Image: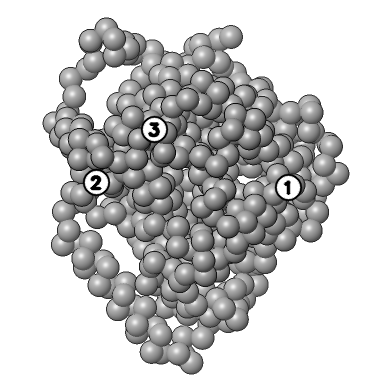
Amino acid sequence: MSTSWPARNWCLRWAPKRKSSGTYPKMKLTALLSSLLLTCTGLLHAGAPDSAERPNVVIILADDLGYGDLGCYGHPTVKTPNLDRLAATGARFTQFNCPAPYCAPTRASLLTGRYPFRHGLTGNPAPDGQRAEEDSLHLPTGEITLAQLFQQAGYATGMVGKWHLGHARPEWLPTRRGFDEYLGILYSNDMRPVQLVESEQPIEYPLVQANLTQRYTARAINFIKRNQSRGFFLYLAHAMPHKPLAASEAFYRKSGTGLYGDVMTELDWSVGEVMKTLRELGLEEKTLVIFAGDNGPFYGGSTGGLRGMKASSYEGGYRTPCLARWPGKIPAGHTNRSPAVMMDLFTTTLNAAGIAPPADRVIDGRDLMPQLTSDAASPHKVILGQLGPRVATIRDARWKLHVLPASDQRSRRAPPGERWLDPRGPDGVTILAPAEQYSPDHYPGLTNGDAPAPMQLFDLESDPGEQHDVAAAHPEIVVRLRQHYENLMQAAAESPAPPPS
């Protein structure tokens, strides 16, 4: 295996020593204060459930998963029996949202319980971005992550897969943000260099992406087995079905539904293997398992009839599948149709484990257990959707107001007779089927409907595809949602700034 990184990478300029050597770089004051706060939090919760009572937590996050990509969400051809079984023996949301329709801001919100405008990561870090500043984007070190809280509570914490919360400096990496161990790609699998990192060191480049789902699954199972006698928090952030799509030989051309179907079949297999491991170890009833997507789909996926796609402010960009299973706690076959948002997973998992969230900052997430166990209404009056640093949408259980003109992010089609080429091509030995990658001709969502304009209002109850602007017919709803938006923005402006980097 090769371990070479480009010269610009921090790993060639700085070789971090492990904690046992006692030679960590000097910590910033904010990081030290966060560490002290976490220690105090752990002391305050010394009376929380002991390791024999508290649940394990497994969060599985798929990358660019469409709302309509699973059988249990209505896909007509893609087969996902293990995920369908997870829904049948647990709970399913039909109105689960991400706070931003692309990767890094949503992942930061999952791990902090806060909207992107609070935690400060509103764009995607990229080592090969068009702008130099993309290389230095990261989750501010003053933010407290879910992994840090579980770690302080005595849990074993492991992460496998896509990080995407900062890669250029050692202090931004998973093992400095609460994870005992890490294996994965530090950003998206179409960003160069696509290399596998273990702990804080690159271990393989170039990387065969066709084997990623298999390798991530094996590492996740290994982590569970090694920590079966201790409470554990596992964050399994799969690369698929983010482009470039890749499936192993065991699944390639086996689904009968194209490369996307092959990838989804393997992703479904992975979830099945994790669930089988929990069952064989007698941990099913002691483990809360959550499966979700980070945002809407890219070409080849399915929004299930919603408008737009990834990076769009229509529902196809924001709404994703979300399933949860905890035998004895969550009733089998339950469906909740009220809105929830990614930050809720932060609060829900902490509450399940008897761990308090940080008390020194606004936490936007709410406990979803009432929704997971009943027809309870959403704990949120409204849910916001961002595009970059700006709030683009605000919605409640029925109505959605586009504060900004809606964006559908439709790429230019290739000229007649020419094959569309992804401007960010794959790196190294990455994909099994380069000629089978999907193009704008395989747009995942609806493309018709009223043209975008500011302050459009859609009735998601009768018009989930956001086809008809009804703002003129319901001016009172526009006023109410706009007032909610302005109040939230004013409160955010008056609240303390996000902890510095």
- Quarter where residue 19 is shown: top left
What residue is disc 1 on?
80
Whichever of labels 1 and 3 marks the residue nearer the N terminus, that label is: 3
Helix, strand, or loop for circle 2? loop
Q: Residue at x 52, y 31 (%)?
A: 161
What residue is disc 2 on?
358
Q: In this view, does 8 lie to the left or right of 215?
A: left
**Residue flagged by tag 2: what amino acid is it?**
Pro
Q: In this view, does 354 lie above or below 215?
A: below
Helix, strand, or loop for circle 3? loop
Q: Are marks 1 and 2 in contact (CB under 8 Å)?
A: no
Q: In which quarter of the image is the C terminus?
A: top left
Q: Is residue 150 left or right of residue 492?
A: right
Q: In this view, does 50 lie to the left or right of 206?
A: left
Residue 62 percent location from the top left of the image:
58, 43
Front label number (1 vs 3)? 3
Q: Quadrant of the N terminus?
A: top right
Neighbours of disc 2 within 10 Å: few (<14), some (14-19), many (20+): some
Whichever of labels 1 and 2 marks the residue nearer the N terminus, that label is: 1
Q: Residue at x 19, y 61 (%)?
A: 493
Find residue 51 and name its label: 3
Mark-to-mark CA distance, 3 and 2 = 21 Å
Residue positioned most to the bottom: 473
- Quarter where residue 12 is shown: top left
Is residue 199 at least partly visible in the picture?
Answer: yes
**Residue flagged by tag 3: what amino acid is it?**
Ser
**Residue flagged by tag 1: what amino acid is it?**
Thr
| Front-lying residue, 132 or 260 | 260
